[in-house]
Each structure stands twice: as structure tokens, then as C-alpha cells.
Image: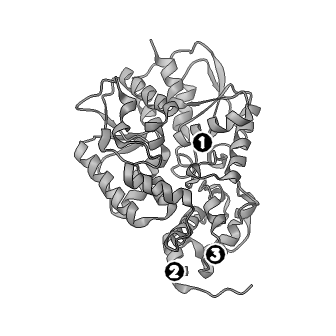
């Protein structure tokens, strides 16, 4: 098959990927290591980027879960996830994005979240919690955590643990809206630019001294993506495990042995680990709890497997991604751990949903839920 080189698209894809397309010499390591192989040929996608070819069917790109596993394996250090995201932008402009993601975009536009839940209910999870007018930290909640009843428990556990450590906690309330992760992975740059600036303004008006989030996806958007769209946030942005690790090191948390001592394994979320190099803080928190024994899975840290929910896949029916979810659950079970802890709402949702089918005897918890149990009176 002959392809006509589109030099304009070559330049655009090179620019959006930080000129990563020029580094690739087509060794095929990316395709060989891809967690979704053989459903995706990463090598072929990069070759298309190098010649500026946009295939008529973008399904291969939309199946990508943006886990960066191929990035970690690439001998040339090519940031492949950036190239795949660049393709998504091209496909979106060509009106070739999946219907599920387009619908999610409209829900963000209309209700401020991809679930389509009412704006007025965004802070309902905090009902009955005494919040502070002059907080030390302000929570920026993930849409999933704000509306999903299971994940609301993570937010409430976080507030409880912080208060026990003497930290004053505030929230943005109903003015808060989606961080834009799904918008970014759909490739809708104009809407993302507007959303990022609006959210940065909301944070600035709140007077938040520190912005705290339970979602690595939100953390990545606020810290790394927003500045690229001219929306800079002038206060520290931290994930809950980073902040709690500092609180623990300062001696303000004194974990006690839980009622049920047990082995725990830890799953590294892609957007906390490979995207932002946060590996040790959650492990420090787990190991600080007497009676909890941390056992590592075969794939951990930069070579951790994925939950299958990244890159917008959590909002689509990505059957290929479910294979990755199942594989990770079985790896957790093989460690002999009673529970798999993690630090991402997407991961909890993906794993717990798959467990309804797989029925493996492994519990899924957020790291802060373990701390909540270990610091109660």
C-alpha cells in the first residue's frame, strides 16, 4: 500500500510529541511490550506519525489506555503516549472520535462532569462534615470520587485522617468542575483551554494554600497539562499520598495495629507512577501501619501493569482494556495478599467492577482507607 506524506501533519504530530517521532527507529519494542498487544500495533502508529498518515479507522489509537508502559520499555526514550494523544487530536478535528467520548464531552460542558450528574450534588459527599473557613488544604475532587458512592468513602476517609493529624480542610464546593482529563484524551483542545483557565481561576479565588486531590489524573492535569494551555496554578498541587507522607514524617499521624493484621499488595496507578514518578510515598504509608505486611506483585513501580481505565477508556466499552484489568487482579491474588491497595479512583472503579465478574477473593482499598482504619480511636 502506498502512502502520501502529509508534511503538515508530520510537523504537527512532531510538535505535540516534543519531536519524539524523530527519535523512533522502528525497533518494535513498543508493540512487543504493549499491554494491549496484539490489539494495537504501536510501531505502526508511530510510523504513521512519521509520514503524517491518518488512517480512516482510528480504533487502534482510541483503544490505547495511555499507560506509558511502552514509554518505560522504549530504548530510545520516545514518549509514545504523547504521540498517541496527538493522533487523538487529529482524529477529533476530523470528526472521527468515538461516540462515547463525544457524549462525555457534552456532559462535561452541560453539567461539569463526564457522568452527567447534577452540578448541585458535587459536594453532597461532604454532607455532615465540618469544614474549615481558613483551611490548610483545599480538596479538588475527581468527578468519580465526588459522585460515586463507593469512592465518596475515600474522600471521607481522607478528611477524617487529615483532621486527626490537625490539618484544616476545605473544599471548592459547587464551583468545582471536571479537571478535563477526558477532554484532554478526546483531543478537544479549544474546550480544554477554556476549562483549564476557568478551573485555575476558581482555585485562585478560593485562596487555597495547597490543592490536594485523590486522583492522579486530576493531579496530572492541574500540574502538568494546564500550564501548556496557559493556565498556571500558583500554589502547590499534591496528591493525597504525597501530602499524607509528609504529615506522617512530621509525626502528626500515629498508626496503630489494625484489628485484622494482614498482607497487602500495592498497585501503582499509571498516572501516579509512570506519568509523575510517585512510587515510594504510598508504600511508606502502608509500611508505617503495624501489622500490615506489604507484598509486591511481579510487576511494580515503573513496570507496573495498568487497571485499564486510562486514556479515556473508563468512559468507553474498551474490551481489550479489560484483559489488562483481569491480568492485574490475578497477579494481586497470586501474592497471597488479602487486599490490593491503590491511590486512584479510576483503578478502584475498574478493579471492583471486574471483580463482579472474576469473583477473586481480593479486596480493593485506597491507601488512605488503610490509614483511616489504623488511626481511629
Counting other residues with Cα less than 10 Å from the Cα at mark 2, is it few (<14), some (14-19), or many (20 or more)? some
- Element carrying mark 2: helix
Numbered label tally: 3
2 or 1: tag closer to the N-terminus = 2
Splitting the image into 4 quarters, where does residue 280 fall?
Answer: top right
Instruction: Please give the name of the residue rendered at 52% of the width and 31% of the height, measured from the top-left corner.
Output: 150
Q: Nearer the viewer, residue 107 or 279?
A: 107
- Element carrying mark 3: loop
The answer to whether the residue labelled 3 contacts the one labelled 1, judged by CB atoms less than 8 Å apart, is no
- Element carrying mark 1: loop
- In the rendered image, the quadrant that contains the C terminus is top left
The answer to whether the residue labelled 2 contacts the one labelled 1, judged by CB atoms less than 8 Å apart, is no
- For label 2, the residue is 11
- For label 1, the residue is 268
Q: How far apart in space, not on screen, are marks 2 and 1 (Cα)?
A: 34 Å
- In the rendered image, the quadrant that contains the N terminus is bottom right
- For label 3, the residue is 56
Q: How far apart in space, not on screen, are marks 2 and 3 (Cα)?
A: 20 Å
3 or 1: tag closer to the N-terminus = 3
List x then y, in percent, for residue 80: 60, 64
Amino acid at each position: 500500500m502506498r502512502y502520501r506524506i502529509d508534511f503538515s501533519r508530520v510537523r504537527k504530530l512532531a510538535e505535540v510529541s516534543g519531536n519524539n517521532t524523530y527519535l523512533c527507529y522502528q525497533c518494535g519494542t513498543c508493540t512487543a511490550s504493549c499491554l494491549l498487544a496484539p490489539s494495537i500495533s504501536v510501531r505502526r502508529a508511530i510510523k504513521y506519525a512519521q509520514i503524517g498518515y491518518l488512517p480512516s479507522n482510528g480504533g487502534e489509537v482510541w483503544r490505547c489506555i495511555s499507560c506509558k508502559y511502552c514509554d518505560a520499555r522504549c530504548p530510545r526514550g520516545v514518549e509514545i503516549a504523547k504521540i498517541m494523544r496527538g493522533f487523538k487530536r487529529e482524529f477529533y478535528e476530523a470528526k472521527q472520535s468515538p461516540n462515547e467520548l463525544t457524549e462525555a464531552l457534552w456532559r462535561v460542558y452541560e453539567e461539569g462532569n463526564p457522568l452527567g450528574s447534577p452540578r448541585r450534588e458535587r459536594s453532597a459527599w461532604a454532607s455532615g462534615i465540618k469544614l474549615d473557613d481558613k483551611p490548610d488544604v483545599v480538596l479538588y475532587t475527581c468527578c468519580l470520587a465526588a459522585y460515586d458512592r463507593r469512592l465518596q468513602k475515600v474522600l471521607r476517609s481522607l478528611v477524617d485522617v487529615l483532621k486527626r493529624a490537625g490539618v484544616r480542610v476545605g473544599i471548592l464546593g459547587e464551583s468545582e468542575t471536571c479537571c478535563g482529563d477526558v477532554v484532554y484524551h478526546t483531543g478537544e483542545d479549544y474546550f480544554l483551554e477554556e476549562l483549564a483557565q476557568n478551573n485555575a481561576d476558581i482555585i485562585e479565588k478560593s485562596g487555597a494554600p495547597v490543592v490536594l486531590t485523590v486522583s492522579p489524573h486530576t493531579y496530572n492535569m492541574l500540574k502538568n497539562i494546564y500550564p501548556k494551555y496557559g493556565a498556571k496554578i500558583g500554589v502547590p498541587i499534591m496528591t493525597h499520598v504525597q501530602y499524607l507522607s509528609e504529615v506522617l514524617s512530621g509525626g502528626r499521624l500515629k498508626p496503630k495495629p489494625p484489628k485484622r493484621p494482614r498482607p497487602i499488595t500495592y498497585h501503582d496507578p499509571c498516572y501516579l507512577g509512570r506519568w509523575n514518578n510517585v512510587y515510594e510515598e504510598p508504600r511508606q504509608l502502608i509500611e508505617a501501619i503495624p501489622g500490615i505486611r506489604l507484598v509486591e506483585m511481579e510487576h511494580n513501580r515503573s513496570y507496573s501493569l495498568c487497571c485499564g481505565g486510562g486514556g479515556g477508556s473508563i468512559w468507553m466499552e474498551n474490551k481489550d482494556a479489560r484483559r489488562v484489568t483481569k491480568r492485574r487482579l490475578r497477579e494481586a491474588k497470586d501474592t497471597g495478599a488479602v487486599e490490593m491497595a491503590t491511590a486512584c479512583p479510576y483503578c478502584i472503579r475498574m478493579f471492583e467492577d471486574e471483580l463482579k465478574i472474576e469473583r477473586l477473593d481480593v479486596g480493593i482499598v485506597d491507601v488512605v482507607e488503610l490509614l483511616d482504619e489504623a488511626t481511629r480511636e
